[in-house]
Amino acid sequence: MTGVKQKSVLTPALLETADKLHSATIHLLRRLRVRDRESGIGPAQLSALSVLVFGGPKALGELADAEQVRPPTMSRIVSGLARAGLVKREATEDGRRVRLVATAKGAKILWEGRKRRVESLANALALLGEAERGRLRGLVDLLPKIVRKI
Amino acid sequence: MTGVKQKSVLTPALLETADKLHSATIHLLRRLRVRDRESGIGPAQLSALSVLVFGGPKALGELADAEQVRPPTMSRIVSGLARAGLVKREATEDGRRVRLVATAKGAKILWEGRKRRVESLANALALLGEAERGRLRGLVDLLPKIVRKI
DNA sequence: AGATATAGTTAGCTATGCTAACTAAAGTGC
DNA sequence: GCACTTTAGTTAGCATAGCTAACTATATCT
């Protein structure tokens, strides 16, 4: 168990904020999921592909770690991507390891799918007031810091 | 196609904010998923159950709409919940409709699972500075507004 | 009564998560 | 230098969760 008792820092205000954040992210992604389907590529595949496109070639285990998924799960996700011609498995000097590389087609598909989802979201953001957009810009940079601490 | 052209409002800054928000929510939920597994109940079941616990009894179609899922999908989610004794299907005057009601056990399980995830997240938030926590409180209230506009 | 509409379920496909068990390659030790 | 262990991935098998298509049952409408 990693559970270190920290009850003193868990104030009601903090719990409420956490609860709202949790609930909002669930519903946000649920809405965007509709757009995912248009790409014909599943969310896990898209996410893994994005790591390869933006982060460069990776071994399967690295990719599994990055995506917080077990190796067998990533192995199958990669199989799907390879079948669709979006990723290539290349051999390395270490015969056990594989180098996973996004293909040009993979990068293209990624950009298109990402564009659709991000534009859906950006259209929603465009409906906010200027002040709220400003606040939001400052706050989105906070989220990765939070994620890293979970 | 519902796609209304709105390219003029999609500024690069807005797209970047949307992209960051999208990516951060994906990774946030991925981290919290670890805690989901402890409850022995899947994320879709947990989310549907929470609608019943907080929103009261619902017909299957209403619940499917609330969860942005098709009726057959919700039908199976509910079957799982019913099998586990967390939800009851009750008959209504309209013989076609079903009234879905959370059981006491369902409410209990929901609270425990939710507590675990929210506490995980709250522990992460506790590591932020006071100023950042304040900013975050502003963000979480903004998110539901955004979600409604997607 | 017969046609149509509505609410759910069932069947069957795909994708994604897991653990357990396997293969293959690399490193270790005597 | 051959056996043992460790490491990297894959395969197999199970469950959940998403979908569409097709079915059943009940209501409603003409």
Image (cartoon, coloured by chain):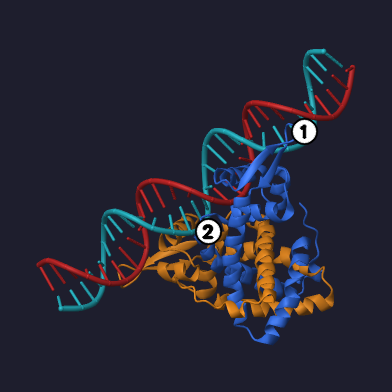
Chain colours: A blue, B orange, C red, D cyan
Q: Is disc 2 placed on a helix, strand or loop?
A: loop
B12 with respect to A80 (left or right): right
Q: How dense is the environment of label 1, judged by Cα within 10 Å: few (below 14), some, or many (20 and up)?
A: few
> B51 or B66: which is nearer to us?
B66
Which corner quadrant of the image does residue A55 belong to? bottom right
- Kind of residue sitting beneath label 1: Glu
Write down the chain letter for disc 2: A
- Badge 1 is on which residue? A93
Q: Residue at x 51, y 75 (%)?
A: B55
- Badge 2 is on which residue? A39
- Kind of residue sitting beneath label 2: Ser
- Can residue B123 be seen at all in this image of the molecule? no
Tell me which label, 1 or 2, sits earlier in the chain.
Answer: 2
Query: Could you tell me residue A133's position as x and y percent?
Result: 68, 81
Query: Could you tell me residue D10's position as x and y percent?
Result: 61, 35
Q: Residue at x 83, y 77 (%)?
A: B130
B117 with respect to B124 (left or right): left
